[in-house]
């Protein structure tokens, strides 16, 4: 029987999860996530992991008895403001070995992120979580619709109406928002902004320092909600850079990479590498999957000793370099025509060219190179599929709060995104959301499918896309 790990993932900001929490996610065969903990760390799960919402402790017990490594995720701390202790008791009664891994609770994280010290020497030495009498600093969770009730309860408890206070919305997230005012005026001030949702109410002397100490609100993308549609296994650097600039990130991948089986065609392509003069990799996915095929077939990077390598895009080049190979040509052109132009100085007559790529892709490149005498083999190594849950998740998002920016990193992400919506409703559903694309090919695809593109990265990488979004925000 395996050990079940009850893991607190912190307040929601992915950077605030502990090392132990991250290791537990990476190591798990089965992951179940409770309501409210979000999915910001699920990209760390192993490819084979069974990931789903938490249903019952009985399910956890059954799976633990099969020897699988199980991680159950809770918002904040499993034993604070969540049902982790109830799960632990049932596991103990069932004689299932378990371990609780603590996490940072939002009451402690969000005020600090908003520039509010919870203790100040000589002014505040005690913290009360909830309606606690006598604490010099109080942090109170308030559900949507209960803000005024929480404020009234504190006033009735003897708190002075001029006590410095703040409401923190979307607490613990990179896009959290703070409204500060004396306690007696806070509800009215928040109402003038039209704000709603769950919030933290903080009062105490530290609130007065928030305007000076709140560095998060000064970040260039603070307050912006950005949707990432990229494949989950590729999203981490992209998300981290957006979060570092203050964005609140929503992840709904519209692309899932499914490796093709290693068949006779793959075996022949690998066997013929020694007489293949040029190998063109159009994506990092193609690099990683082809290398896995190569290793599975008993080969390694030495198989490319007689080949020149071409990488389309710097991320593809970095993927090759991660395998110890440096491409002779790196081009930022994601079009077949652009790549053919980059190869103009190369003698192509009689050259054998291998292009590992997605199963469905543009076919212009083979004909362009064949016209110059090259023998071109297109080798599909993966399928670009849409995750089955993406459609429902997108509809829920845009039928509720929506986002400010929608990002697309490939034509496949655009196609799958558009297919999730009724065709005649798409522009209306998206509202005022801006479309940001990683390069002109993706942008052209978006336009052909009826989207208005307002942001195009000059550098065709996720870093370039983040910079383009930041530059657009600065102009507003």
Image (cartoon, grey):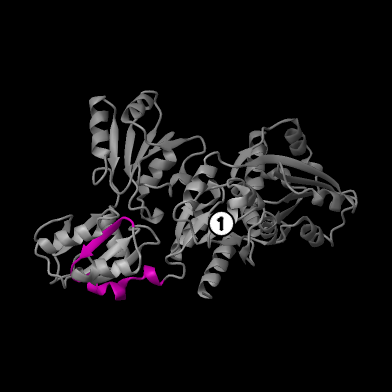
Is residue 367 in view?
Answer: yes
Foreground: 262 or 63? 63
Q: Is residue 22 left or right of residue 453?
A: left
Residue 361: x percent and y percent? Answer: 73, 47
Residue numbers of the magenta segment: 197-218
Which residue position is annotated with label 1?
A: 428
Displayed quadrant of residue 138: bottom left
Foreground: 455 or 318? 455
Relative to 415, say whether 114 is above or below. below
Displayed quadrant of residue 163: bottom left
**Mark 1 secondary-structure assignment:** helix
Q: Is residue 206 left or right of residue 22?
A: left
Residue 43: x percent and y percent? Answer: 48, 46
Relative to 65, say whether 225 is above or below. below
Q: Residue at x 35, y 58 (%)?
A: 170
Foreground: 56 or 198? 198
């Amino acid at each position: 029987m395996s050990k079940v790990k009850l893991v607190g993932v912190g307040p929601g900001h992915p950077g605030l999860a502990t090392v132990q929490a991250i290791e537990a996610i990476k190591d798990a065969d089965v992951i179940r996530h409770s309501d409210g903990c979000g999915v910001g760390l699920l990209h760390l799960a192993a490819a084979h992991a069974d990931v789903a919402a938490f249903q019952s402790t009985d399910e956890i017990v059954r799976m633990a008895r099969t020897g699988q490594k199980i991680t159950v995720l809770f918002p904040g701390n499993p034993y604070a403001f969540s049902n982790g202790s109830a799960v632990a008791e049932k596991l103990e009664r069932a004689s299932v070995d378990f371990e609780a891994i603590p996490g940072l609770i939002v009451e402690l994280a969000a005020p600090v992120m908003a520039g509010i010290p919870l203790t100040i020497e000589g002014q505040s030495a005690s913290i009360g979580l909830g309606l606690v009498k006598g604490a010099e600093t109080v942090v109170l969770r308030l559900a949507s619709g209960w803000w005024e009730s929480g404020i009234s309860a504190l006033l009735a408890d003897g708190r002075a109406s001029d006590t410095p206070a703040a409401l923190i919305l979307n607490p613990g997230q990179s896009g959290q928002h703070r409204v500060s005012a004396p306690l007696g005026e806070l509800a009215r001030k928040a109402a003038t902004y039209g704000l709603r949702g769950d919030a933290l109410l903080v009062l105490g002397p530290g609130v007065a320092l928030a305007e000076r100490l709140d560095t998060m609100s000064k970040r260039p993308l603070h307050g912006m909600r950005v949707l990432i549609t990229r494949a989950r296994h590729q999203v981490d650097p992209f998300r981290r850079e957006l979060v570092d600039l203050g964005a609140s990130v929503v992840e709904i991948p519209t692309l899932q990479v499914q490796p093709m089986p290693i068949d006779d065609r793959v075996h022949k392509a690998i066997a013929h590498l020694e007489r293949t003069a040029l190998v063109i990799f159009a994506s990092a996915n193609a690099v990683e999957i082809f290398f896995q095929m190569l290793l599975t077939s008993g080969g390694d990077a030495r198989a490319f000793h007689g080949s020149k390598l071409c990488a389309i895009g710097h991320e593809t080049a970095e993927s090759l370099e991660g395998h110890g190979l440096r491409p002779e040509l790196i081009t930022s052109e994601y079009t077949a025509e652009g790549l053919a132009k980059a190869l103009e100085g190369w003698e192509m007559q009689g050259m054998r060219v291998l292009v590992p790529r997605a199963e469905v892709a543009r076919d212009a490149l083979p004909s362009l190179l064949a016209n110059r005498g090259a023998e071109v083999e297109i080798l599909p190594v993966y399928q670009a599929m849409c995750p089955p849950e993406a459609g429902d998740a997108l509809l829920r998002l845009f039928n509720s709060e929506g986002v400010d920016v929608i990002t697309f990193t490939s034509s496949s992400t655009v196609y799958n995104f558009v297919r999730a919506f009724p065709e005649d409703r798409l522009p209306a559903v998206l509202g005022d959301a801006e479309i940001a694309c990683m390069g002109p090919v993706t942008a052209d695809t978006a336009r052909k499918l009826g989207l208005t593109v307002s942001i195009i990265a000059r550098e065709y990488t996720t870093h370039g896309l983040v910079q383009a979004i930041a530059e657009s925000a600065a102009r507003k």
